[in-house]
Image: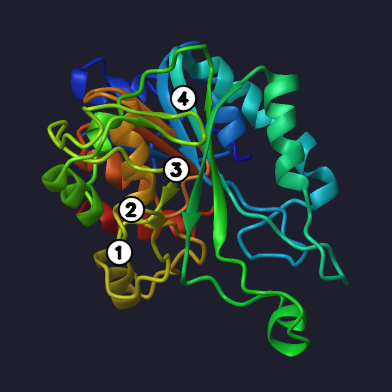
């Protein structure tokens, strides 16, 4: 990592997110956040204990083919990421959360799945000390049908379109409020509300009481399978936007577009649910800074870090 000179930052409220990062000059600053072009492990080591409310990130996956933005092999992945996780846990507040988006992959040369991401979850809980608050699922219909050898050539597997989004907490009771992410009631729920249901006990043992069909809570509690288009069922969102402002401006300026962006709805869901206005959100693998962009719009303070300068050049377009 290139040596960075010490910076004497302002202590104004606007720059309070920057004050958390000691010794690194921001690559870019917005009203509520800052981007740092540096090694995120070293940047996190400079952040004080218990000072970040949410870490939301998607690190490079352990794919068996090499990506231009860098990725670690399956056999080394857990050991590699645990060092980041220890710093993430340290900087989080006691009621803070760590949300990890990570995709699965295939074992080289055969149509079988790797379990590296499950090994990582176990290590994060048993070795680092996180609690697994809940696992959620991102359905991405834009994913390519790979590995082509097994999906489109030999036709022995189906397309992989789901990624895990693991929500970890530092303490037993993380800050969270699902009322901030309520969805419209489904047609079935509205029908039941109009028709009414009988008080009963289902064969599973669940009690259906007289309040079951009341639609007076402001919306439906979302499931852990996230789909922005099907409010009652899933978190579904593609990551292949070609006409959003970020992509257009990168193309116009001849700046490299980050090849593995996640949609804004993904961090938006968790930032709304797990933080309050003014809280601090950190993305140590910021890439095109989608997390920072969403945090900015939701009036959260934020810190984004990445090592690839050309991706950060494009990220600045999000804040114009």
Which element type, helix, strand or loop, lies under badge 3?
Answer: loop
* Mark drawn on residue 264: 2
Q: Label 4 crowding class (10 Å Cα cut-off): few <14, some 14-19, many 20+?
A: many
- Mark 2 or mark 3: which comes first in sequence? 3
Real-space Cα separation, disc 2 to disc 3, in angstroms? 17 Å
- Mark 4 or mark 2: which comes first in sequence? 4
* Residue 40, quarter of the rendered image: top right
- Mark 1 or mark 2: which comes first in sequence? 1
Q: Residue 229's x, y, as percent?
A: 30, 62
Query: Which residue is nearer to you in this view: 30 or 65?
Result: 65
Any part of residue 184 in sight: no
Residue marked by disc 1: 246
Which residue is located at x 74 percent, y 51 percent? 72
Marks 3/1 in contact by CB < 8 Å: the verdict is: no
Q: Against 192, is 3 above or below?
A: above
Real-space Cα separation, disc 1 to disc 2, in angstroms? 11 Å
Real-space Cα separation, disc 3 to disc 1, in angstroms? 28 Å
Marks 1/4 in contact by CB < 8 Å: the verdict is: no
């Amino acid at each position: 990592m290139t040596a960075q000179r010490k910076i004497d930052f302002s202590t104004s409220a606007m720059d309070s997110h920057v004050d958390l990062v000691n010794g690194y000059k921001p690559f870019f600053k917005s009203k509520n956040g800052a981007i740092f072009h540096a090694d995120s492990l070293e940047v996190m080591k400079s952040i004080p204990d218990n000072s970040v409310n949410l870490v939301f990130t998607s690190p490079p996956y352990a794919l068996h083919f090499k990506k231009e933005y860098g990725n670690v092999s399956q056999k080394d992945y857990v050991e590699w990421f645990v060092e980041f996780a220890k710093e993430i846990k340290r900087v989080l507040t006691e009621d803070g959360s760590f949300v990890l988006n990570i995709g699965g992959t295939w074992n080289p040369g055969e149509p079988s799945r790797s379990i590296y991401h499950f090994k990582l979850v176990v290590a994060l809980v048993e070795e680092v000390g996180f609690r697994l608050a809940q696992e959620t699922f991102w359905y991405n219909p834009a994913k390519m049908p790979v590995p082509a050898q097994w999906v489109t050539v030999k036709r022995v597997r189906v397309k992989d379109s789901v990624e895990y989004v693991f929500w970890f907490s530092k303490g037993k009771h993380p800050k969270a409020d699902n009322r901030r992410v309520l969805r419209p009631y489904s047609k079935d729920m509205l029908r039941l509300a109009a028709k009414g249901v009988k008080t009963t006990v289902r064969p599973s043992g669940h009690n259906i009481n007289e309040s079951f069909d009341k639609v007076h809570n402001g919306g439906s509690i979302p499931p852990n399978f996230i789909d922005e288009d099907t409010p009652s069922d899933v978190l579904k969102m593609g990551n292949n936007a070609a006409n959003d402002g970020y992509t257009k401006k990168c193309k116009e300026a001849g700046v490299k577009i980050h090849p593995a962006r996640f949609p804004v709805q993904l961090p938006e869901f968790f930032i709304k649910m797990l933080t309050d206005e003014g809280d601090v959100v950190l993305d140590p693998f910021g890439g095109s800074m989608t997390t920072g962009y969403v945090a900015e719009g939701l009036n959260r303070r934020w810190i984004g870090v990445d090592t690839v300068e050309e991706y950060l050049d494009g990220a600045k377009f999000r804040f114009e």
